Amino acid sequence: QLRLVESGGGLVQPGSSLRLSCAVSGLTLDDYAIGWFRQAPGKEREGVSCISNNDGRTYYADSVKGRFTLSRDNAKNTVYLQMNSLKPEDTAVYYCAADRRHSGCSISVSWTYNYWGQGTQVTVSS
């Protein structure tokens, strides 16, 4: 059974760091790109970052570039989103999702991602 489970969210102060994890089962990271998306209350879901399946290349939204780092551990079937210098505007529910594709990844659209986790809440507040 294919499953994605996010963890690592929480309540932190501005400027703090968090590391989100996306543990996947029922698929191999060699075949799926993994993306992270977030949705704040009253706002549309937005792409944050993704990592391609074939070469591990990463892509970031401009709003998080330089602060967030995406990585993967194929042996553990887990993808990590390291979030540094967090801002109140980063507050959202964060979702990881899997996209079966030959190569590359995209965060400009979410409809190509067929499998989603349940989400983890990140709140940045003083």
Image (spheres, helix red, strand yellow):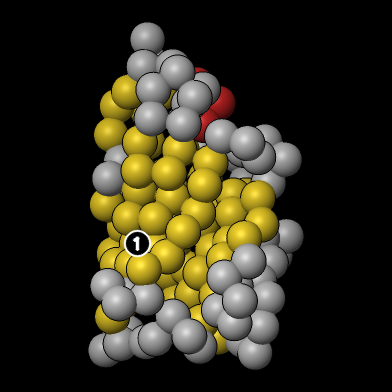
Residue at 50% of width from left, 54% of height from top? 70
Tell me where residue 60 appears, x and y as whole percent: 65, 50
Q: Position of residue 17 (x, y in %)?
A: 38, 30
Is residue 30 positioned above or below 116 on the image? below
**Quarter of the C terminus within the rendering:** top left
The image quadrant of residue 23 is bottom left
According to the image, label 1 marks what residue? 22
**Residue at horizontal 63%, vertical 66%?**
57
Q: 72 left or right of 107?
A: left
Q: In terms of depth relative to the viewer, which is nearer, 21 or 94?
A: 21
Q: Amino acid at mark 1?
A: Cys
* x and y, in percent, of residue 38 in the image: 52, 47
Q: Residue 74: which quarter of the image?
A: bottom left
- The residue located at (55%, 79%) in the rendering is 53
Above or below residue 28? Residue 104 is above
Instruction: Say if residue 59 shows up in the picture.
Output: yes
Residue for point 43% across, 44% down:
82
